[in-house]
Image (spheres, grey):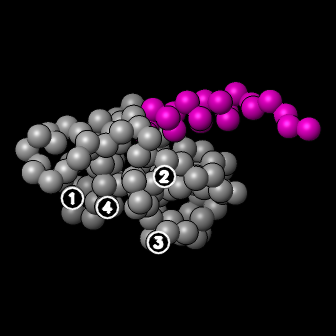
Amino acid sequence: MRMSPTNTESLYNKFINVTRQKIVDKYNYGIENREFARPLTLNDVTIRKGRKFDRIFNRNSIWGFVVKNPCTHKGEDCSTGDVLRAQGLHQPAKHVRGNIFMNNDEWFHWTGPKYMLDKKQKKAE
């Protein structure tokens, strides 16, 4: 018997769909200046559910991973909604790049989560 989703699960599902829409919006911004690009639709951004992570795909390529429940990944503590860059199709990279619950969306491009800032860049900000 399937239980009804908890508040955390329903909130997570809501924000994962908001993140999908943000990916589409960032991709389509300024697309008229790109000669061979075709617009991205919400159907092009898909989510494949996993045990620890949900994988987000942008058409046929991996966009990133989202942590479903608090866990430890490669020695780092991750909380629900943390976004990890893809190391490969089935494995996320080590460090957290952002969180889907953040109001700020400067932590990702339409191509995927941004790279980590090095120590010099962090000090300058």
Near-viewer residue (15 or 99): 15
Residue 114 among those drawn in magenta: no
Q: Is residue 74 above or below residue 45?
A: below
User: Looking at the image, do the residues carrying marks 3 and 1 touch, with CB atoms under 8 Å apart?
Assistant: no
User: Disc 2 to disc 1, how far (Cα)?
Assistant: 28 Å
Q: Is residue 82 visible?
A: no
Amino acid at the residue labelled 1:
Gln
Q: Residue 56, labelled with which disc?
A: 2
The residue tagged 3 is 88
Q: What is the x, y in percent for residue 26?
A: 27, 40
Neighbour class for label 3 at 10 Å: few (<14), some, many (≥20)? few
Element type where label 2 sits in the image = strand
User: Looking at the image, do the residues carrying marks 1 and 4 touch, with CB atoms under 8 Å apart?
Assistant: no
Neighbour class for label 4 at 10 Å: few (<14), some, many (≥20)? few
Give the residue at x 59% y 69%: 75
Q: Earlier in the sequence, mark 2 or mark 4?
A: 2
Near-viewer residue (7 or 31): 31
User: Comparing marks 3 and 1, which lies closer to the viewer?
Assistant: 3
